[in-house]
Image: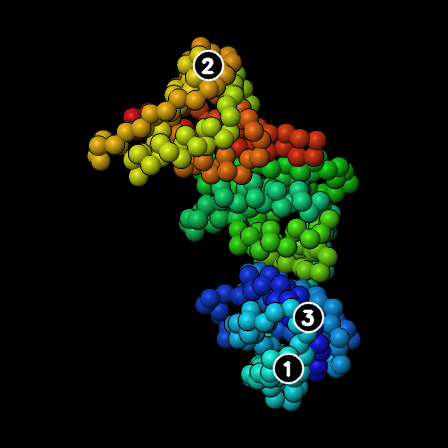
Amino acid sequence: MEFSVNSKILLSQLNIAYGAISKNPVLPIMEDFLFEVKGNTLKVIATDLETTIISTIDVDGKGDGTVAIPANTLLQTLKTMNDIVLTISVNTENFAVEIVSFFGNYKCSGDNPSDFPTPPDDTDSFGITVDSNLLKKGINSTIFAASSDELRLAMTGLFFNVQKDGLYIVSTDAHKLVEYHMKYDFNGIDPKGVIIPSNSCSNLEKILSGSETTNITFTKNNAFFGTNNTTIISRLIDAKYPDYKGVIPTDNPIFAKVSRKDILGSLKRTLIYANKSTNQVVLNYDGNKLNISTTDFDMGKEAKESISAELIGADSFEISYNAKFVAEMLNVIDNEDIEFKLKSKSSASIIDIETETDNTKFLIMPVLIGG
């Protein structure tokens, strides 16, 4: 088995595949990349059993074969090289690996590929095709709101919900919630909802920039995401996602318009002076001003700021939030101006951003003032 390949291209694909290699693998061979060469095509596979990443690279093949190569050794070698051509050859009897480059020769011991876990297949599946940029936007808009609490397993992932009017991506940790709706006509496709682990979604987001469309295929236990030269296979979280629709208010009659840049900057500054356990700030809308304040009685700290705002539907309005949660939402919004939809100091607030191709709803629960 032998092939030649550009070091920069190989390193780029290996960096993507490395996202599926665990720091504490179940099996020692899962610290390896599986290399499969057929003709002039190299397939690189990495897995932690939850996520499998398969990258395909064009090479100059001079002999077919398969070998498992230690990932860290290979990555550390490639990171020291410039944009050069190197040749990798493998003795398929003892799996000895040799790398030949302009700088010199390097040898390491590979592993028997038969010990490498077999990737899942996509039989008995159905699929959809979506715009890669919208999918990337959907993941970026939602992943920060997923829970890290393993006792709430369903909420540690992103809920991918295929409906007749498009693909919904949802995340929540019970304090904040985001619903991203990618508008498509999926009439004729049976609705399906699955939960994708957050780590798999993070790896997926990294590969989406270079392709126009992504093919998504669902089986009973896995989801397959295919772009130009990379496929990510994610095991589904076997749990029931919360009925989140019921907590999204539909009748918030008060609207508060503010500059995203102004309110984000103010929240970041006042957060420095907030109580570290609650991160509580009070937003008081009064006329054409928004007064933002916080007090940490235990540490003797306080902060007050005022920014321009427009309140519609009430003369004044006061509500308290966890400033950290609000800032996380504002960080993934591109709009220069945003509008909070409000009802009462104890009701959830909504930021609703709609375009021709998608719609994003951000829900933030208030903190009871003084609580």
| Residue 170 versus residue 124 in the image, above or below | above
Choose the circle earlier in sequence order: 3 or 1. Answer: 3
Residue, far top? 315
- Quick one: label 2 or label 3, which is nearer the N terminus? 3
How far, Cα to Cα, is label 2 from label 1?
69 Å
Question: Which residue matches tag 1?
Answer: 100
- Give the label, 2 or 3, closer to the camera: 3
Instruction: Name the residue at 47% across, 38% down.
Output: 328
Identify which residue is drawn at 53% across, 51% down.
198
Q: Residue under circle 3? A: 6
Q: Which mark is residue 288?
A: 2
Left or right of residue 114, residue 326 in this image:
left
Asked if one can make out residue 193 in the rendered structure from this viewpoint, the answer is no
| CB contact under 8 Å: marks 3 and 1 | no
Label 2–label 3 contact, CB within 8 A: no
- The circle on residue 312 is none
Which residue is pictured at 62% across the width and 63% down the height? 12
